[in-house]
Amino acid sequence: MKFTMTWLKKHLKTEATATEVAEMLNRIGLEVAAIEETGPDFSGVVVGHIITRTQHPEADKLGVCSVDVGESEPVQIVCGAPNARDNLKVAVAKVGAVLPGDFKIKKSKLRGETSNGMICSVRELGLGTEHEGIWELETDAPLGTDLKDAIEIDSETVIEIEVTPNRGDALSVYGIARDLAAAGLGELITDTSEITSETADFDIAHEGCSYLAIASLKNIENKQTPEWMKSQLEAIGLRSINPLADITNYVMMDLGQPMHSYDASKVSGALKVTSATAGEKLEGLNDETYTLSSEDMVIADDTGTVGLAGIVGGVSTSADETTTTALLEAATFNKVRIAKSGQRLQAITDSRYRFERGVDAKLPRIALKKAIDLAQEICGAEVVSVQEKQASATEILQLDFELSFLKSFGGVDMPKQEVVDSLTKLGFKVEDKGDVLGLTVPTHYHIFDGGSQDVVEEILRLKGYDAIPAILPEMIPVNALDDADYFHADRGARRALASAGYLEAINYSFIPQKHAQSFGGGQDSLRITNPITSEMSDMRPSLLPGLLMAVKKNVARSESHIRLAEVGHIYTDKGQTLKAAGVRFGGFKHWQAGSVKEDLFALKADAIALLESFGHDATKLQTDDKAPEWFHPGRSGSIGLGPKRFVYFGELHPAVAKSFGLKGRVYIFEADLDAMSAIKVKPKKFELSQYQAVNRDFAFLVAEDVPAEKLLQTLRGADKELVKEASLFDVYQGEGVPAGFKSVAMSLTLQAMDRTLTDDEINKVSDKVVADMSKRYEAELRS
Amino acid sequence: MTDLHQLKTESLDAITQISTVAEIEELRVSMLGKKGKITALMQGLKDMEPEARKTFGAEVNAVKTEVAQAIESKKQALETEILNQKLLSEKIDVTLPAAPKEVGKLHPLSYVTEEIEIILARMGFSAAKGPEIESDYYNFTALNIPEEHPARQDHDTFYLPDAEDGTKRVLRTQTSAVQIRTMEKHKAPLRVMGAGRVYRCDSDLTHTPQFHQVEGLALDVKGKITFAHLKGVLQQFMDSYFERHLNMRYRPSYFPFTEPSTEVDIECIFCSGKGCRVCKDTGWIEVLGAGMVHPNVLKAGGQNPDEVQGFAFGAGIERLAMLKYGINDLRFFFESHQSFLKHFGQSAVKIRR
């Protein structure tokens, strides 16, 4: 909502400057978006005096002027205007001046003669269309005075405010003035003369309209809209259309009542409010054609629909510059109906905007009177008749307000009189009942569903929220909310991955459909109906596509070593799941390590570190070689406990890599953090033995397809009490090892809590290892 | 006597000339060895008169000790020199680059979210979560934004196809939906915070279709928690987050789910309120929306508005991160450029003070 200071002062007697008005508006909840000055858009232009004009030696049409601009020496300016002559007061744009269009004046040479500025025409200054020569000033201002100070130039301060949806009352200059006056910034100039009317011969056949008034006018001379009205409308961004349309627009902006003007000669019979016929079309004044449904409320004449009630008038019957007889309509429409129609039809108009936020039910009578007066004044119209009909009574909201609530809820104490005064200024009727105030809510408030809380807001916004002290609340017992899981799973995983060397990324939750489909998603139910772009259409079924797109972007930016991870939700038909995923790609060169490439086992270590950060015991977890189809089928697997799989890891399937534009081996993992934290792991007991530990190394010859983890488990399981650690330190295939076999070297650490182990005990365990390996995997001990 | 003094001077002079361990050993033997000159004087003591033996004995002993110490320290010095010579032959270029060690970083938004959670947790707020694909009911209706409410248009909502049971589904436009879900499960007094992703169908220089909010909700029995407490909590929140006391400004505003509602500004942290480019010369920066919970929202959450009251607030995490860490382009947050993540990411071992 925009308004000018001039317009505001028609409703508010105040000495306040625009800045003071803006400050107050901010304080009372009408946020100022912008303060703009209209009018001259130039700087550095001063009053000057042409002392002499001499003919330019090289150009017939140019003159060389010696101009006094109030400085010690006159300046030389080359000027081509025919009226430039000796002894003339002119507007001089000095070197450094800026003229409209961001035109900067520089020192220049014209056909060999120096020109230190420019002598301006009215048009060059943006002050009119006059351009037959330079502007001959008539001013007594001293030479050198800024032109803006020397002459009276129409300028206007426009303030734009952002009106929140609850403030339908502030969608007019009058409404804004009322609020400013209540806050103490001047005195409201009330303007409440109303129409006098006859019985209506029209019909309100729709419950969405509670009141309708129509004024019939004749002998309209469609004169020009007066300059004052035009300039006010234009200053706030409204185009002048024709006098009648301008009048209704002006009244809407002035008082807040949307209105419409019909050409009476185009209307057949009486107007009425009714329901639209499903499927009928209306061509609106805003050049949009609407296909209506029976839910829409319309204004109709005998021939059918002529306007969409409260939203937009129809082209066929609206007044235009040829209109001589007119009907002016002012009505009260139900805001929910208007909102729903407006939403359904996607009709965005000033009228809808106001009706859906609520228009004061008292306004139509006042607004129509004002519009009639203006039509008489501007168009010389004569009133034929004014008719009105009240279909249903205006709801009046009354409530009791307990004064103590201001302190117990708003946190601030105020004297009763101050409260009463504030509310009265805002238009409340206040009845003093002791500790309670009986309040009648003014009809210009439309969202007042919070009862006493709304009253507190009204009092406090006038008082200023600064008056409320800032006090820390007392601690309360932390209630039963258990947020440990959240901090552990979500926040913990982020730290675990950063500790493992990943750069944490946050990618978009929506990804291109083709990538969603490649990762098990892409269902219709998870596709956004109104995506920003087709690249952001599907809710991600996995964190991996986002990470892979990020890899591609980084590679494009010449990053050669990528290590990105993300913690976030993925979405399926069952809901959202918290996951963590990482990607390693490329490598780096180092003087010691040489050329280092990312590999699968570095990534596996990260996955295990993540699992361990959730309390899982790495030696108890089981790895298998099964992973979803976006993994390389021979280089991937999962880690979990029994049937529960927590992490999938491995190399990205080369075909999938290709679809992301990636070449080379890409290592990825994705962990289900919800599943990982759902299992509560018991902490392991800690014991420290005082006795010597013993190491035994073994090398087994075993079929190459026996998983290493099985061998390690066998080693570890050889003795529950004595085995402290089992590790694998070499895998070898090649010379000395038959084809189809591998040699696996492992180490076992044995230790007892209560004694030094004897050779017998050690040999017993060793023998069992050898026997178990042979029995389970036909593994043969190498000597 | 002269012998003794001569021997001392002779020994100490010799030490200064010596440059090898062998020579010093030679000297030791010649002075202090079994047949050494000083040893010989010691042996001569036994033939002296008791009185003379006592005085001369003490002098000989002193010289013996002094010479022995001088020899020992010279020996150590020579040995150290030899070792150092040997070590210098092992010299390496310590200015060579360090071993490769990957340093991971937390995303700046993750870190800032943690900072905020720690600050609020200190004031008794527990963390709560909610779904990002949210029903129309929890995102709007229960928050006092019925279908025809003009505020719905301000939200630029992303829609998903209706659920099988006909539920209208949206991507949550605000974390406030967490309020209702919490109230449904827990009774006052309660304090919860919910941080997470929210979505709006808007994309330009200052908007990304995905961003993060943090939400706070505090409820208690009537009279126990007021607008003054909201101000207290927010002051503490901002002062802790920006690590200094900031002036704050509360402007009346409107959110359907709070009444009264306020938009909250902090004094511009770049110019301390004097006015600069960042605050557009106003001296203020808007950082929060807040208010007292609307009775309709309490009802929707299963609380009795006649018995319970409280406040709620919400802030954009990106904005707070940008202000504190000097990040000047919102869109960088979701571009996953490693250079950005390395620069603005925070160490995994860094914990907020």
Image: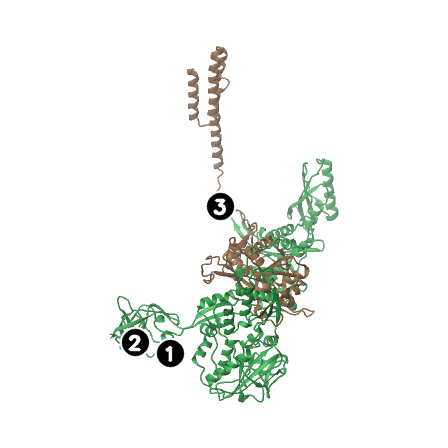
What is the number of the mark on residue A387?
Answer: none
**Residue at the disc numbered 1:** A129
Left or right, residue A16 beside residue A347? left
- Asked whether residue A26 is in view, the answer is yes
Instruction: Identify the subunit bearing mark 3.
Output: B
Q: Residue at x 29, y 74 (%)?
A: A89
Q: Position of residue B116 (x, y in %)?
A: 57, 55
Q: Which subunit holds the residue at mark 1?
A: A
Rendered image coloring scheme: by chain
The picture quadrant where one finds residue A140 is: bottom left
- Amino acid marked by disc 3: Leu
Chain letter for the residue marked with disc 2 in the picture = A
C-alpha span from label 3 to label 2: 74 Å
Image chain in green: A
Q: Which residue is mark 3?
A: B96
Do badges 3 and 2 share one subunit?
A: no
Task: Give the camera-side residue of A718 and A580.
Answer: A580
Percent position (x, y) of residue A480? Answer: 67, 55
Colour that chain B carries in the picture: brown
| Secondary structure at numbered mark 1 | loop
Residue B212 placement, left or right of A114: right
Vertical placement of residue A343 versus B218, above or below = below
Give whichever of discs 2 and 1 has the lower sequence position: 2
**Of the two numbered discs 3 and 2 in the rendering, the one whose residue sits closer to the viewer:** 2
The amino acid marked with disc number 2 is Gly
Query: In the structure shown, which secondary structural element does the residue marked by tag 3 occupy?
Result: loop
Q: Amino acid at mark 1?
A: Thr
Residue A239 picture location, percent across and down: 47, 78
Residue under pointer 2: A80
Local secondary structure at mark 2:
loop
